[in-house]
Each structure stands twice: as C-alpha cells, then as structure tokens.
Image: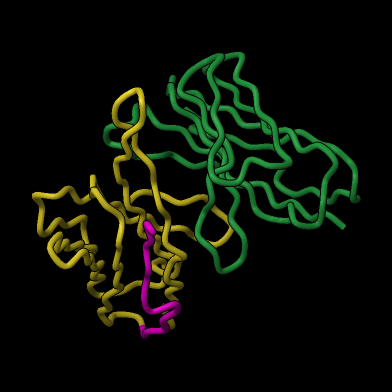
Chain colours: A green, B yellow
Amino acid sequence: NAGVTQTPKFRILKIGQSMTLQCAQDMNHNYMYWYRQDPGMGLKLIYYSVGAGITDKGEVPNGYNVSRSTTEDFPLRLELAAPSQTSVYFCASSYDASTYEQYFGPGTRLTVT
Amino acid sequence: KNQVEQSPQSLIILEGKNCTLQCNYTVSPFSNLRWYKQDTGRGPVSLTIMTFSENTKSNGRYTATLDADTKQSSLHITASQLSDSASYICVVRYSIKNSGGSNYKLTFGKGTLLTVNP
C-alpha cells in the first residue's frame, strides 16, 4: 500500500511552459485534493474532487486545471507557467468528508524561472 | 474572516524538554480541529483530531487540548526527541451553507517550526 504518490519530486520550468503534476492513491479514497504551500504560508487549496468525473475549484484555482477520470488518479495541469506558481505542491486524499483526515503525498517542488 | 493563527512561529528546545504550541481560530461554525506534523520535505501527517465536545486527547507523547469557548487549542509535546523536529500545523474545519445544504471547508494555519537540539 503506497498511499499517495506524486511525480515528479522536483521540476524547473521556464515561463510560459506547461506541465502536468501526477498524483495517484491506492486507498480507494473518493476525495482528492491539490494544495500549494508557499514559504511561511499555510496550505492553500487549488482544486478538489469528490469522485471520478467530479472536480471543483478551491481558493486559488487560477492558472491550473484538473481532471479525474479514475478514482486513483488526479493530475494537476499548469498552463503557461508563471513565477507566481513557484511553490511546493501537495496532493492529498481522504475517504470521506466527515472526519476529513487527509493523507498527503510527498510533494512536488516546482520552480518557474 | 475565518482564520487560524499559530504561535510561536518557531521554537528551539533541547532534547528531553517539554513544549506547548498554540492555535487560535476565528472560524465559525466550528466542526473540528486537527493537528498535523510535517517533516522537512514531506507531506503533513495527522497527529490528532479534536471535536467540539473533546477537551483533551493524547497520542503518545503528544497531547492536544481544545477550548471551544475561547477558540483555542494547544499541542503539548512531552520529553521531546530529535525526531520531533518538524512543522506542526493546525487545521480547522468549519461548515458553510449553500443552496445544496451544508458544506465544509478547511483553514490551515501557517504552522510552528519546532527544532529539537541534542
């Protein structure tokens, strides 16, 4: 049981490039989330999904897109990368929303220059 | 505005000593509060959850308290170890009402960075 996995661990992008951050979980969780964590700041929710085919915006969705074609995978797409998107990105999953314990992946550190 | 404030921002203690981390929140209506531990370069891991009716809950050397009246929580670490060096994040869940009924949101604190020195 690997839990929540994320790839890549590190990435450097040039301004205007695009990329997809991969996230997968093997716990059969319905809920999945993408967060960004900037230095000295709390985690901010980018997008979340309550099940395959259902996604919704969080606090800071601009510049990102997501899809959820399967229960296991929840990729995050960055289009036209900007320096403001330099951050550490965490994917998380939870079984339901009532207890709301989220299991986090190891993170992807992204630098846009 | 729904906010979670943690103090201190950072803390350095010697191995074997105790410490207490604070979390004050203004979110309403309160649903629950969770403490996470985040090791450097890793994702957060849940330590404990506090609901409205709970005052104290322990998880090994970690003891969390909640005062729902004053909207304060604390995390006490006893007999600290080097492995306790991490950021500790307070997360408060609150409900919001929309056209479909009730929904829930989370607000994350910025965390307290704890360093335990030998």
Q: Residue at x 25, y 67 (%)?
A: B75
Quarter of the image with the C terminus of chain B is bottom left
Q: Residue at x 89, y 41 (%)?
A: A17
Residue B40 falls within the magenta-colored stretch: no
Residue B118 in view here? no
Res A74 quadrant in image: top right
Q: Foreground residue, A23 or A54?
A: A54
What predominant SS class does the magenta segment belong to? strand
Res A87 quadrant in image: bottom right
Q: Where residue B27 sits: x, y (%)?
A: 30, 55
Find the residue positioned furthest to the front. B99
Please, is residue A18 above or below residue B9 in the view? above
Q: Where residue B28 sits: x, y (%)?
A: 26, 52
Q: Residue at x 67, y 47 (%)?
A: A108
| Image-based side of A68 in relation to B2, left or right | right
The mark tally for this picture is: 0
Q: Residue at x 61, y 14 (%)?
A: A69
| Image-based side of A2 in relation to B60, left or right | right
Quarter of the image with the N terminus of chain B is bottom left
Please, is residue B78 above or below residue A37 in the view? below
Q: Foreground residue, A74 or B68?
A: B68
Please, is residue B49 above or below residue B74 in the view? above
Q: Where residue A47 sits: x, y (%)?
A: 57, 35
| Image-based side of B117 in relation to B30, left or right | right
Residue B11 falls within the magenta-colored stretch: yes
Q: Where residue A15 sits: x, y (%)?
A: 90, 50
| Image-based side of B39 in relation to B90, left or right | right
Q: Range of the magenta residues?
A: B1-14
Residue A25 in view here? yes
